Image (tube, grey):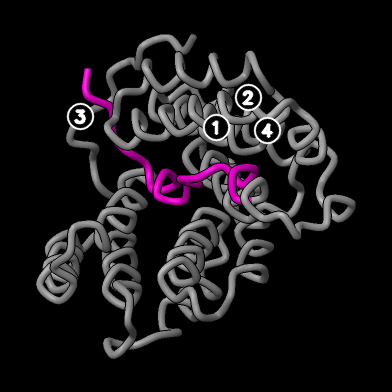
Amino acid sequence: MKIKSLSLLFLLLTLPLQAQEEENPNIDVDALLPAKKEFLNLPADDRKKCIEHFGKASRFFQQKRVFECLDALHEAEKVFSDSAELLNLRGSCYVEMRAFDKALSAFEKALEYNPKNTSVKFNIAEVLFVTKQWQASHDLFEQILGEVPDTNISLTRLVEFKILLCKKKLDRNEEALILAEKYDYLDDSPYYYYAKAAISYDEGDLLEAEQWLARANRIFQNPAIIAPWQDTLVEFGYIKSFYGEEDAPEAP
């Protein structure tokens, strides 16, 4: 079975933070989170082995080789299991398999190890969104919005779009309409077009909605830019998934 990629996956860390810290001889160890201190207290060979397994798992994940990714994570966790990065990647594997309960559990555990990790928070909010927990998703996305730098326009706009959709499900339609008009066609993101499409879908005007999406595709021709926005409409239910609703394989 082919598994649809969800938009949370582009936020995965590609390198373990521990690897970056290990290479910095001037790092203030006392300022590190407890789990990171524990990692740096491991023998050098163990640290190297864990980093290698994590790197291999990351490459497998990028290639959509989910089960091999999980195997590599298992090997890394034999060395050191208290890692937000490992848990974040494990949770993302479970999302790919649509095992959302297991994904949420992994992300929440990752957040315990690194409470300020915005990427993990986004992944949690995304799982809440996909599982239609609209209020919880809305509130967490609003929290995330306050943490994302203003310079990160692509992520800021995507989070605002998800908040807009949550408001629609929560019958906060006036707020949603105001948010839909927040940016115009000069904005450097697909927000304007996707917000217009969402309103058109909501009003039952499918033709107009498709026209707005077609305009977005013509202007933002990079599939990597469009993909998370398109996925969001699929997750929300405006667009039917190409792969349908087949059961996902059982997560290990």
Left or right position of 98 against 144: left
For badge 3, the amino acid type reads Tyr
Residue linked to disc 4: 83
Between label 2 and label 4, give the one nearer the viewer: 2
User: Which of disc 4 and disc 2 is earlier in sequence?
Assistant: 2
Give me the residue at 81% from left, 40% from top: 37
Label ID, residue 243: 3
Residue linked to disc 1: 51
For badge 1, the amino acid type reads Ile
Provide the secondary structure element on which disc 1 rests: helix
Report if residue 104 is visible in the image: no
In the figure, residue 67 lies in which quadrant? Answer: top left
Boundaries of the magenta span: 1-20
Between label 3 and label 4, give the one nearer the viewer: 4
Tell me the CA gap for discs 2 and 1.
10 Å
Q: Position of residue 141 (x, y in %)?
A: 60, 58
Q: From what the image shows, is residue 166 above or below residue 211? A: above
Q: From what the image shows, is residue 111 above or below residue 172? A: above
Q: How many marks?
A: 4
Residue linked to disc 2: 45
User: Which of disc 1 and disc 4 is earlier in sequence?
Assistant: 1
For badge 2, the amino acid type reads Asp
Report if residue 107 is visible in the image: yes
Q: Residues within 10 Å of mark 1 (few under 14, many from 20)?
A: many
Q: From what the image shows, is residue 26 above or below residue 211? A: above
Q: Residues within 10 Å of mark 4 (few under 14, many from 20)?
A: many
User: Which of disc 3 and disc 2 is earlier in sequence?
Assistant: 2
Quarter of the figure with the N terminus:
top left
Q: Position of residue 60 (x, y in %)?
A: 34, 28
Tell me the CA gap for discs 1 and 3.
35 Å
Left or right position of 249 against 111: left
